[in-house]
Image (cartoon, grey):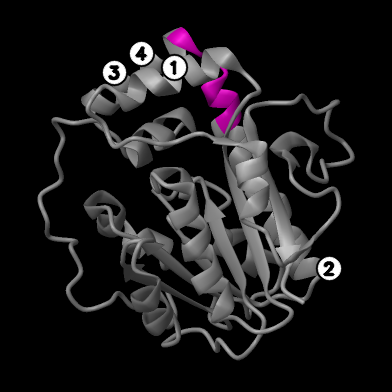
Amino acid sequence: MSDSATTPGSSVHQKIDTSVPHSARIWNYWLGGKDNYPVDEEAGDTYTAVFPGIVTIARSSRAFLRRNITYLVSEAGIRQFLDIGTGLPTAENTHEVAQRIAPEARIVYVDNDPMVLAHARALLYSTPEGATAYIDADVLDPDRILAAAAETLDLSRPTALILSNILGHVADADRGRELVTRLMGALPSGSYLSINDGSRGVDPVFEAAQDAYNSSGAVPYNLRTVEEITAFFDGLELIEPGVVSVPLWRPDPSASAPEIIAEHGGLARKP
């Protein structure tokens, strides 16, 4: 571990509520992780009984992130990453992908879930040349995030902002755009924005399953239309192929023909 930190006032000691399913733990379950509870497995199994394709969406989302990070490090020369809503560690986390290519890369993770905070030590493992840090903060508090991130990252240098399956937790799409604008506004020219989220208008079975999940008492996740996801990139230069179903974003040459799924994302550069 190198140059790691959490912010003061961390909620790591908060009680983890195991009586209510939590999206981060369910997502971990779908990805094959072990950091979840019976209530999460039950909710995950109930969801997959209605829509088995959610496992494909979860794993395709992680593969999209890996390809994004690889492009950012190898082709765009980015060495700083601000990953908000990182969730529970599984495999191919941002720091693992980035530092495998560029050991000097610096990564700041942001989340406010007590269980995720309890696993911060695993997330904070870094190469000796680089650095990782963890911020206990909510995506709805961008000023706090930026102030804390500046302790590890030089925000006068190009930085990649990663928002993977987090903006769906912001109920109002306009509010989501305000948050993205505030965060990207603090980053210099040459910075990048990576977003992917569940999409509406592609798979009605997925939409029915998500609507049922949202009404179950769990923390809701709001699907966006492709147009709404694209609007998060307003004012930025989208990298080809633009906002697409995530398997279609620069697929690995050795991969089988990608299928369209209800998860869209893109990567854009700040001019």
Q: Earlier in the sequence, mark 2 or mark 3?
A: 3
Looking at the rendered image, the disc whose residue lies closer to the viewer, 4 or 1, is 1
- Separation of marks 3 and 1 at Cα, in angstroms: 14 Å
The magenta segment is: 50-57
Q: Position of residue 51 (x, y in %)?
A: 50, 13
Disc 4 residue type (three-letter):
Thr
Q: Are marks 4 and 3 in contact (CB under 8 Å)?
A: yes
Q: Position of residue 160 (x, y in %)?
A: 63, 70
The image's mark for residue 209 is 1
For the residue carrying disc 1, how many other residues have a C-alpha within 10 Å: few (<14), some (14-19), or many (20+)? some
| Magenta-colored stretch includes residue 54 | yes
Q: Which residue is mark 3?
A: 42
* Label 4 sits on residue: 46
For badge 2, the amino acid type reads Glu
For disc 2, the neighbor class at 10 Å (few under 14, some 14 to 19, many from 20) is few
Q: Is residue 4 left or right of residue 180?
A: left
**What secondary structure prevails in the magenta region?**
helix
Q: In the image, what residue occupies the spot 73% across and 51% down? A: 67
> Can residue 44 be seen in this snapshot?
no
Which residue sits at x=31%, y=53%? Answer: 116
How far is the residue under mark 4 from the one under mark 3? 6 Å
Q: Which mark's residue is nearer the viewer, 3 or 1? A: 1
Q: Secondary structure at mark 1?
A: helix
Distance from disc 1 to disc 2, alpha carbons, whole Å, reads 38 Å
Q: Nearer the viewer, mark 1 or mark 2?
A: 1
Question: Is residue 109 in the magenta section?
Answer: no
Of the residues under marks 1 and 2, which one precedes in the sequence? 2
In the picture of the structure, the residue carrying the numbered disc 2 is: 75
